[in-house]
């Protein structure tokens, strides 16, 4: 690894703390809950619908509160075509566990018949696996970041996933993507290892972003691929500044959209990856108590009048521990 001097955000503008959430396409809500809650031990913090397609769930998994930087979200779409992971996508989602927890996860994945490979990148060990839809994930152990308070399915809090370690971006135009991360998003370039350039944000989780150095051919969307990556804005005022900052650099952000649990702005970057900027507030306790997050189907007010119709279109599923799952 060649250490480089940090490049700071040249615009003197807003900087992101790191990843807010990552959203992917899958097929089946039960299969997804069994993997992300049953195997990885995450909490289902919100069961709602895709606001643009109410016949499809939008499932959010994270730590006890669904804190920004811990949230992996899914659209389970039964008849979706199989996607191909490639350029223009988040290629690998990185989950971070406490420093001494890698051995626990090595044993757990083996016991639960999740095939994994051990690899090294920037002098860190990674356990890389695929979820049942083919989404690529990896686990890394780091000191930084608070432990999760959520224990489920035999994962104690001192071994549990703390949130995202970061992500590996697969870009069709990595120079542009890197420039965007450093000069607009406010990350520091911290190194290159031949295959990847590494960028870091100031937050303690969701902070380490690797980008391929050689341009990668386009993948195609569908189940088993990531749809977008969202970055944190600390509040609504900063979110407005973000939209301006992105537009001033020539990107074309959408208007600010109310996503109930955060406000969102989307734009496509030059390497093909769909970026979102999402506000930390109000969060998932906005419409149900923290103790029972994710237990009930939550709908925004404008869909409440159609609840029974919508519920009839959604396949029921349960969140269960791995012992209850036939592996
Ligand atoms: Zn999003």
Image (spheres, rainbow, N blue to C red):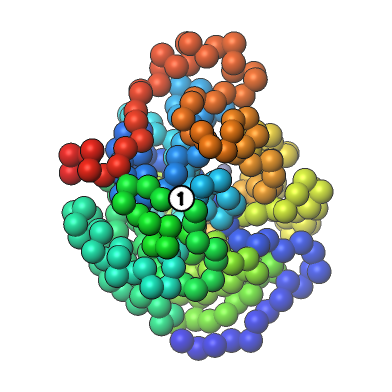
Residue under the image location 55 percent in, 12 percent down: 306
The C terminus: image quadrant: top left
Residue 277 visible in image: yes
Classify residue 308 as left or right of residue 249. left
Compared with 277, 188 (above or below) is below
Q: Residues within 10 Å of mark 1 (few under 14, many from 20)?
A: some
Please state the total of marks drawn on the protein image.
1
Which x, y percent locates residue 221?
A: 41, 44
Relative to 298, is 218 above or below? below
**Left or right relative to 10: residue 160:** left
Residue at image coords 21%, 53% = 112
Q: Is 199 displayed left or right of 44 in the figure?
A: right
Q: Residue at x 77, y 45 (%)?
A: 236
- Give the labeled residue for mark 1: 150
What percent of the width, then of the height, locates residue 152? Answer: 37, 47
Residue 34, image x, y percentages: 31, 41
| Quarter of image, res 81 | top left
Question: Viewer-proximal residue, 209 or 159?
Answer: 159
Q: Is mark 1 within 8 Å of ligand 1?
A: no
Residue at the image position 56 percent from the left and 55 percent from the top: 69
Secondary structure beneath dot 1 equals loop
Relative to 256, say whether 149 is above or below.
below
Give the image quadrant in which the ligand numbered 1 is located: top right
Residue 36 visible (yes or no): no
Residue 273 vs residue 54, the one in the foreground: 54
Viewer-proximal residue, 41 or 275? Answer: 41
Question: Residue 58: percent from the left, percent from the top?
Answer: 48, 33
């Amino acid at each position: 690894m060649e250490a480089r001097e940090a490049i700071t955000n040249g615009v003197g503008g807003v900087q992101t703390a790191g990843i807010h959430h990552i959203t992917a396409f899958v097929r089946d809500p039960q299969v997804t809950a069994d993997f992300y809650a049953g195997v990885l031990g995450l909490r289902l913090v919100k069961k709602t619908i895709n606001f643009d397609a109410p016949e499809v769930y939008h499932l959010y998994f994270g730590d006890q509160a669904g804190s920004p930087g811990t949230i992996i979200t899914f659209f389970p779409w039964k008849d979706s075509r199989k996607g191909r992971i490639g350029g223009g996508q988040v290629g690998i989602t990185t989950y971070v566990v406490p420093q001494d927890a890698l051995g626990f996860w090595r044993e757990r994945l083996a016991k639960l018949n999740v095939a994994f490979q051990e690899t090294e990148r920037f002098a860190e060990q990674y356990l890389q696996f695929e979820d049942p839809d083919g989404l690529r994930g990896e686990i890394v152990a780091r000191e930084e970041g608070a432990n999760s308070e959520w224990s489920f399915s035999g994962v104690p809090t001192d071994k549990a996933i703390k949130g995202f370690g970061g992500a590996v971006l697969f870009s069709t135009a990595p120079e542009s993507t890197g420039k965007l991360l450093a000069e607009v998003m406010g990350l520091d370039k911290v190194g290159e290892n031949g295959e990847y350039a590494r960028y870091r944000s100031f937050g303690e989780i969701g902070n380490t972003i690797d980008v391929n150095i050689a341009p990668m051919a386009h993948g195609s969307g569908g189940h088993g691929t990531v749809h977008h990556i969202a970055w944190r804005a600390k509040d609504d005022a900063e979110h407005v500044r973000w939209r301006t900052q992105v537009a001033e650099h020539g990107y074309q952000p959408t208007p600010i959209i109310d996503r109930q649990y955060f406000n969102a702005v989307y734009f496509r970057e030059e390497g093909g990856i769909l970026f979102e900027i999402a506000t930390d507030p109000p969060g998932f306790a906005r419409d149900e108590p923290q103790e029972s997050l994710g237990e009930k189907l939550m709908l925004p007010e404008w869909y409440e009048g159609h609840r029974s119709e919508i519920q009839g279109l959604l396949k029921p599923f349960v969140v269960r521990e791995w012992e209850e799952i036939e592996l």
